[in-house]
């Protein structure tokens, strides 16, 4: 029995997801911009796109599918490499309670992906001083929210980042997303650098994923 055709909205949503996934996998685009560009390409100018936008979960599925189809020979090794770099950073930053998140955590990282670590800290200055003492040059992106003293007066829950520190380590981009310690107990809001704030892995979990991936690679070789 032939497959039943998708309704128009679902069909367009699937096309947008597929086009956006290609931009993410091929060019390293972030989820938000990839969806907007894909919607414009599929729907054309002037058409309301919000009704046709795929969810981030749908897009994640498409990115996995694209990687498996077009990058099966290179993406797994790239992912292991980035996860190993991430564990080195997590070991260095252990006093700041590091968690890996983003594409390196969820397994979709590719050629253009960078490493995103959530840190849970008493003060951003602690991390900045730590990096300065290590002679690590970095840049800072402030949170979009109001100044920190105003946030605290509102009883902020810790779910929003205080700031993000950016630097290069072994030719890979590192982004440290700084949260208050209270953020460990709440659902983290995604940063603009990546959509997925729910997927966060501690050092032991990342090391286990690396070990499992290497075991699979060994089995394939033998």
Image (cartoon, grey):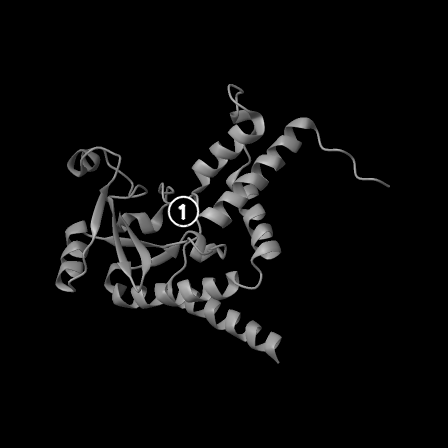
State left or right for residue 186 relative to residue 61.
left
Q: Position of residue 211 (x, y in %)?
A: 48, 73
Q: Residues within 10 Å of mark 1 (few under 14, many from 20)?
A: some
State left or right for residue 1 relative to residue 56.
right
Instruction: Tell me what residue is drawn at x 51 percent, y 18 percent.
Output: 46
State left or right for residue 135 relative to residue 74.
left
Q: In which quadrant of the rendered image does the C terminus lie?
A: bottom right
Q: Nearer the viewer, residue 65 or 101?
A: 65
| Residue 163 figure quarter | top left
Q: How many marks?
A: 1
Instruction: Tell me what residue is drawn at x 24 percent, y 63 percent.
Output: 95
Q: Secondary structure at mark 1?
A: loop
Q: Is residue 59 visible?
A: yes
Q: Nearer the viewer, residue 201 or 170?
A: 170
Q: Is residue 123 visible?
A: no
| Residue 145 figure quarter | top left
Residue corresponding to mark 1 = 197
Task: Please tell me whether residue 47 is drawn above or below residue 166 in the rendered image.
Answer: above
In the current view of this chain or complex, which residue is farthest to the right?
1
Instruction: Tell me what residue is drawn at x 58 percent, y 50 percent.
Output: 66
Task: Please tell me whether residue 157 is drawn above or below residue 129 in the rendered image.
Answer: above
Q: Nearer the viewer, residue 181 or 141?
A: 141
Q: In which quadrant of the rendered image does the N terminus lie?
A: top right
Q: Position of residue 50 (x, y in %)?
A: 51, 26
State left or right for residue 145 relative to residue 10.
left
| Residue 16 figure quarter | top right
Q: Position of residue 169 (x, y in %)?
A: 28, 62
């Amino acid at each position: 029995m032939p497959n039943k055709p998708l309704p128009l909205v679902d069909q367009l949503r699937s096309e947008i997801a597929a086009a956006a996934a290609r931009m993410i996998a091929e060019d390293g685009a972030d989820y938000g911009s990839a969806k907007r560009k894909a919607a414009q390409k599929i729907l054309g100018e002037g058409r309301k796109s919000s009704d046709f936008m795929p969810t981030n979960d749908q897009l994640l599925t498409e990115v996995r599918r694209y990687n498996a189809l077009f990058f099966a020979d290179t993406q797994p090794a790239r992912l292991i490499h980035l996860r190993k770099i991430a564990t080195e950073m997590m070991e260095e930053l252990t006093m700041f309670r590091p968690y890996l998140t983003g594409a390196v955590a969820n397994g979709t990282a590719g050629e253009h992906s960078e490493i995103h670590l959530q840190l849970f800290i008493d003060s951003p200055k602690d991390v900045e001083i730590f990096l300065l003492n290590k002679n690590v040059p970095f840049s800072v992106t402030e949170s979009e929210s109001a100044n920190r003293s105003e946030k605290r007066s509102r009883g902020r829950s810790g779910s929003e980042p205080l700031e993000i520190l950016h630097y290069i380590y072994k030719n890979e981009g590192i982004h440290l997303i700084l949260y208050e310690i209270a953020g460990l107990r709440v659902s983290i809001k995604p940063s603009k650098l990546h959509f997925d704030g729910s997927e966060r892995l501690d050092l032991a979990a990342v090391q286990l994923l690396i070990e499992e991936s290497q075991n699979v690679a060994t089995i394939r070789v033998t």
